[in-house]
Image: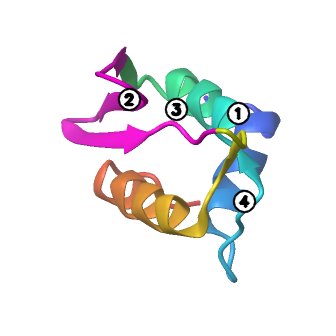
């Protein structure tokens, strides 16, 4: 069951025009709640596995906000994993 907070984050990820002000920490919390396995890679890399789909992202820095390109990639990843609010 997806909480209202996580549903709000999913909707923000799928929103058009693509947002560039989503905090990566909130995205990670949302993915974790959906059942994603999250592991640290080298440097700022974060490996995510969800429903058989795998993707590596770079944790944004120095800003905590995710850029539009990463949000678009995350959107495709979630669609492939079966999530599309």
**Residue 46 magenta:** yes
Q: Which one is closest to the eye, mark 2 or mark 4?
A: 2
Task: Give the percent coordinates (x, y) of residue 51.
Answer: 27, 35
Q: Earlier in the sequence, mark 2 or mark 4?
A: 4
Residue 12 is marked as 4
Relative side of 12 to 79, left or right: right
For marks 1 and 2, give the CA distance.
14 Å
Task: Give the percent coordinates (x, y) of residue 8.
Answer: 78, 49
Task: Give the percent coordinates (x, y) of residue 18.
Answer: 65, 75
Residue 60 is marked as none
Label 3 sits on residue: 31
Within-10-Å neighbours for mark 1: few <14, some 14–19, many 20+: some
Within-10-Å neighbours for mark 4: few <14, some 14–19, many 20+: some
Secondary structure at badge 3 equals helix
Secondary structure at badge 4 equals helix
Q: Earlier in the sequence, mark 4 or mark 1?
A: 4
For marks 2 and 3, give the CA distance.
12 Å
Q: Which one is closest to the eye, mark 1 or mark 2?
A: 2
Within-10-Å neighbours for mark 2: few <14, some 14–19, many 20+: some
Within-10-Å neighbours for mark 3: few <14, some 14–19, many 20+: many
Q: Earlier in the sequence, mark 1 or mark 2?
A: 1
């Amino acid at each position: 069951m997806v909480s209202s907070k996580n549903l709000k984050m999913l909707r923000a990820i799928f929103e058009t025009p693509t947002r560039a002000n989503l905090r990566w920490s909130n995205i990670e919390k949302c993915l974790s709640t959906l059942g994603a396995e999250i592991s640290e890679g080298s440097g700022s890399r974060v490996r995510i596995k969800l429903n058989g789909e795998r993707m590596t992202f770079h944790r944004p820095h120095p800003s905590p906000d995710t850029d539009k390109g990463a949000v678009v990639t995350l959107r495709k990843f979630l669609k492939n994993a079966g999530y599309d609010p």
